[in-house]
């Protein structure tokens, strides 16, 4: 794969505009310069790894990053092609009982997904990903890490389709995601927000060694019964 390395803003702008994979070499002579948003930057070109090259190339080609793997699962970035499958997973009311549903119009969800890939993955390099059952190559849920302005760390989120629940998949995926966060992203503090009535997700957080930290009011449910979130936290 051909990945360019440049320390010039004009070259970086050209590469970005033409979909050419590139890495910016930052040094004392160009730190005050403005480079394209989302550019992959390094201070020492010798620190560039084969995985870095692969990810830069995949981003330029519009291909998803592989995040992590377990014995039964793989976690990767979402693609537009995954959106119809998400509608299948979200069709059961037990999945959307404690979380926001997808857009009613799939076209809106597709546009949202495109923006998410471009703005969240492109800027942060992480976000909500999809969980794939390796044996059959099927998307079975979502898990990932997101930045929140009111928290000094990352927030863990997760969802599994109904038929894949109670099989240990959620724990397997979330444990791998947290390990990725520590080892690759270098983040030590995490939280998860779980509806107080969502006992399976609360048990999962506790199994992951999160501890209850705070209670946060949530919007009233459709049946007008008050709800609240339990904020779980962990430092590793």
Image (tube, rainbow, N blue to C red):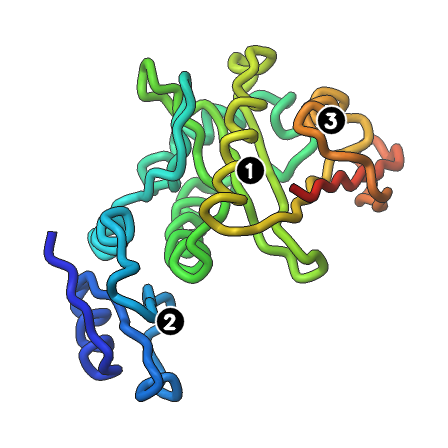
Q: Secondary structure at mark 1?
A: helix
- Tell me which label, 2 or 1, sits earlier in the chain: 2
- Tell me which label, 2 or 3, sits earlier in the chain: 2
Residue 204 placement (x, y as % from top left): 68, 24
**Numbered label attached to residue 167:** none
Where, by quadrant of the figure, is residue 21 drawn?
Answer: bottom left
Q: Please determine whether, in this image, residue 101 is positioned above or below residue 164.
A: below
Quick one: 212 or 31, which is closer to the camera? 31
Quick one: 45 or 210, which is closer to the camera? 45
Q: Residue at x 69, y 44 (%)?
A: 235
Which residue carries the number 3 mark?
206
Asked if the residues shown at circle 1 and circle 3 are in contact, with their CB atoms under 8 angstroms apart, the answer is no
Classify the position of the C terminus by image quarter: top right
Residue 22 placement (x, y as % from top left): 21, 65
Which residue carries the number 2 mark?
37
Left or right of 3: which side holds 209?
right
Left or right of 23: which side holds 109?
right
Which residue carries the number 1 mark?
178
Residue 32 placement (x, y as % from top left): 39, 88
Left or right of 28: which side holds 128?
right
Q: CA distance from mark 1 to mark 3?
A: 14 Å
- Tell me which label, 1 or 3, sits earlier in the chain: 1
Where, by quadrant of the figure, is residue 175 drawn?
Answer: top right
Where, by quadrant of the figure, is residue 231 drawn?
Answer: top right
Q: Please determine whether, in this image, residue 222 is positioned above or below residue 3.
A: above
- Depth-wise, is mark 2 or mark 1 nearer the camera? 1
Quick one: 12 or 107, which is closer to the camera? 12
Q: Residue at x 84, y 46 (%)?
A: 216
| Neighbour tally class for label 3: few under 14, some 14-19, many 20 plus, Cα within 10 Å | some
Q: Secondary structure at mark 2?
A: loop
Q: How many marks?
A: 3
| Neighbour tally class for label 1: few under 14, some 14-19, many 20 plus, Cα within 10 Å | many
């Amino acid at each position: 794969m051909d990945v360019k390395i440049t320390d010039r803003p004009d070259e970086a702008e050209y590469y970005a505009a033409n979909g050419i994979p590139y890495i910016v070499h930052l040094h004392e002579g160009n730190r005050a310069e403005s480079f394209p948003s989302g550019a992959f930057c390094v201070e020492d070109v010798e620190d560039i790894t084969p995985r870095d090259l692969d990810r830069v190339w995949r981003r330029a080609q519009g291909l998803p990053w592989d995040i992590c793997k377990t014995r039964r699962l793989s976690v990767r970035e979402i693609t537009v092609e995954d959106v119809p499958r998400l509608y299948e997973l979200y069709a059961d009311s037990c999945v959307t009982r404690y979380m926001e549903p997808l857009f009613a119009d799939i076209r809106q969800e597709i546009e949202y997904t495109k923006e998410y890939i471009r703005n969240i993955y492109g800027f942060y390099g992480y976000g909500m990903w999809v969980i794939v059952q390796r044996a059959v190559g099927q998307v079975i849920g979502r898990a990932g890490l997101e930045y929140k302005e009111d928290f000094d760390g990352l927030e863990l989120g997760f969802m599994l389709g109904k038929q894949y629940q109670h099989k240990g998949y959620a724990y397997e995926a979330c444990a791998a995601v947290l390990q990725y966060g520590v080892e690759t992203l270098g983040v030590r503090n995490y939280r998860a927000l779980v509806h107080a009535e969502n006992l399976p997700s609360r048990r999962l957080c506790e199994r992951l060694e999160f501890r209850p930290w705070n209670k946060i009011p949530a919007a009233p449910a459709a049946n007008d019964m008050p709800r609240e979130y339990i904020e779980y936290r962990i430092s590793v």
